[in-house]
Image: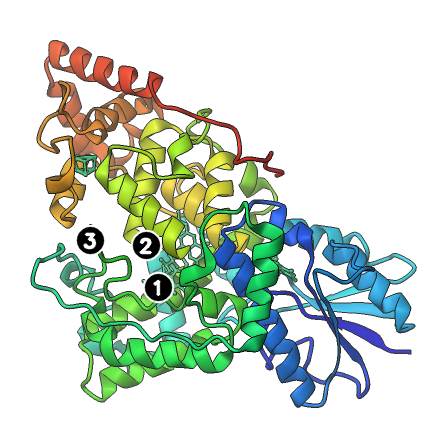
Amino acid sequence: SMPLLLVLGDQLSLSLATLRDAPTGAVVALCEVAEEARYVPHHIHKVGLFMAAMRHFAQALRDKGYKVHYSRIDDADNTQSLVTEAERIAAQYGCNEVRVARPGEWRLWEAMQQRQKAALPWRMIEDDRFFTSPDDFANWAKGRKQLRLEYFYREQRKRTGLLMEGDAPAGGKWNFDHDNREPIEATLNFPSLPTHHQDAVTQEALNDAKRHFSEHMGSLDNFNLPVTRKQALVDLNHFLDQGLADFGRYQDAISDTEPFLYHSRLSAALNIGLLTPQEVCEAAEQQYLAGHAPINAVEGFIRQILGWREYVRGLYWTQMPGYKRENRLGFERELPAFYWDGNTDMRCLQRAIQMTIDNSYAHHIQRLMVTGNFALLCGVKPEALCDWYLAVYADACEWVELPNTLGMVLHADGGLMGSKPYCASGKYIDKMSDHCQHCRYSPKQVTGPKACPFNSLYWHFLETNAEQLNRNPRMKLIYGSLSRMKDEKRDAMRQQAEQFLASLPTIQGYGQPLHT
Ligand code: FAD
Ligand code: DLZ
Ligand code: SF4
C-alpha cells in the first residue's frame, strides 16, 4: 500500500519535500475546491491564479512521469473541501496514509494535525522551501527579551553568505535604508511589463474561475499573473534587468498612476512555489557582483526576502494560534465599506483600493502607509482588516499576511513585528506621493472642511492610545508635541476626528458573511 501525496495550491515546486523520494507509483493529488476560494472571498485574479497554476503544475508532474489525480472544481464527485477530498481520493486508490507538507495556514494545519491518528492517518512533513524552518526561528528567539528583524536578518546573511565579504557585510553596512526613501518624481520612467501568453489550459482555468466566482472582487480581463515556472522566470529576469537597480531609492515612493513602480511583483510566484527564495536572492546578488545594481538596491531587496519574509513566517508558526486573537490596542471598528469598492473622496485611499481591485496587487507602502495606516488610525478590529488583506491580494497566504496586518499595521501583537506603530499623518503621504494635488482635501490643514482626515485622525489615535504608547521611547518626541498643544486646538482636532469617524460607512463582510 502507498501514501497519497497531497500537493496544496501553494506548493507548486518540483523540489517539494512531499515529492522528494516519492515511492514509485505513488499517486500525487491536487484538489481544486470551492471552500478554499470562499473561506474569504478571494479576488478573482487570485482564484484564477491558483486554478491555472495548479493545472499547469499537474501537467508538469505528468510530464515528469508522476501519476497524478487532479480534482477539478466541476467534477461531480468533488467534495469541495481539501481534507475530505484528499481522504476520498486516498480511499479510491487504496492508500494507507495521506502525506502532506506543512500548509500555509494554521486552520488547515490544525485540521490535518487532528487527522494524524484517524483510520486513514495523515502524515505531516516540513516544508523546506524556505531559508529557515519554524524550529530554526524558535531556537533563534529562545531567551531573547525582544525579537527584532535586524538581528535575525544579520544572522541569516552570515548563515547563507549572501552579500557577505568574509565576515563583513558587502558595502560595509548591514542596512542601507537611509538611501531608500526618495519620494515619487514626475520624471521617472517605469519599465513596461511582460505580458504572459494565455494558452488553452490557462484560458479554461480562468473561464472556470469566472463561472463559479464571478461575484468576487475584480475582473479577469486584465489577468497577467505568471501561472507557470517559465512565466515566473520571465518576470524575475525582467525585474533583474529593469527594476532592481532603482528598487532601493524608490522603495517607499507612492504614485497616483503607477501601481508597480520598481517593485519586483514576484510575491505571488514565490508564495505558490513557482520560484524559490534562494534563486531569487542569488540572482539579485549576482546583479550586484556584476556591477549592474547598487548595494542599497540589492541589500534592500534581499532584506525583504531573506529577512522579512522568513521573519514573519517564523513569528506566525511560533505564535499561532494565540497570535490571531491578539488585539493589544483593543480595536472594535468594522472595516469601512469603501475598502471593497474604492468609493471614497480621499484620493490616496481611492487609488490604493482601485489598484487593488484592478490588479490584486498593491506595493508595500500602499498596504502599510495608506490602507494600513488609515485602518490603524480609525481603530479597525484585526479580524476584519486581516480578512480583507487575505482576500484581496494574489500573494496573500495567512503565514505572511497575518503578521504584516495584525503585527506591523495594527500593532496588535505588543511589538513583535515593530517597536512602534507605523502611524502617520497626511504630511507623510504628501511627502512620498503625488496624490494630494488631486485630492479634495488639503494635507496642510488639520481642522475645517478641507482638512485631510489623516491629520486629525493621527492626533486622535495618539490621544486615545496614549496609555499603551506614551511610554514607548520611540514615541516620546511625538507625545511631547501633543502635550504642548493648546487645549482648544486639541479639542478642535478631537471633534474633527470624531465627526469623521461617526460618518464612516461600514458593512460586515462582503456580499456574503466572512467565516473566520
Ligand atoms: P517587492 O517590494 O519587490 O519585495 C520583494 C519580495 O520581498 C516580495 O515579493 C516578498 O516576497 C518579500 N517581502 C517584501 N516585504 C515583505 C514583508 N513585509 N513580509 C514578507 N515578505 C515581504 N506579502 C505577501 O507575500 N503576502 C501577503 O499576504 C502580504 N500581506 C501584507 C499585508 C500588509 C498589511 C502589509 C503591510 C504587507 C503585506 N505583505 C504581504 C508584504 C509586502 O507588501 C508584499 O510582499 C509586497 O508588496 C509584494 O510585492 P512585490 O513582490 O512587488 O514586492
Ligand atoms: C487560495 C487557494 C484557492 C483559491 N484555491 C485553492 C484550491 O483550490 N486548492 C488548494 O489546494 N489551495 C487553494 N488555495 C490555497 C489554500 O487556501 C491554502 O492557502 C493553501 O493550500 C495552504 O497551503
Ligand atoms: Fe490622502 Fe490626505 Fe493627501 Fe487627500 S490630502 S490624498 S486624503 S493624504
Residue 206 in view (yes/no): yes
Q: Dividing the image into four equal quarters, which quarter contains ligand 2?
A: bottom right
Instruction: Give the residue type that dot 1 points to.
Output: Gln
Relative to 292, is 435 above or below?
above
Name the residue carrying label 3.
Answer: 255
Of label 2 and label 1, which has the lower sequence position? 1
Local SS, label 3: loop
Mark 2 vs mark 1: give the one in front.
2
The number of numbered badges drawn on the structure is: 3
Instruction: Give the residue type that dot 2 points to.
Output: His
The answer to whether the residues at label 2 and label 1 have Cβ atoms under 8 Å apart is yes
Of label 3 and label 2, which has the lower sequence position? 3
Look at the numbered disc 2 and say if its residue's Cβ is closer than 8 Å to ligand 1: yes
- Residue 71 position, x and y percent, is 74, 66
- 201 on left or right of 19: left
Name the residue carrying label 2.
Answer: 364
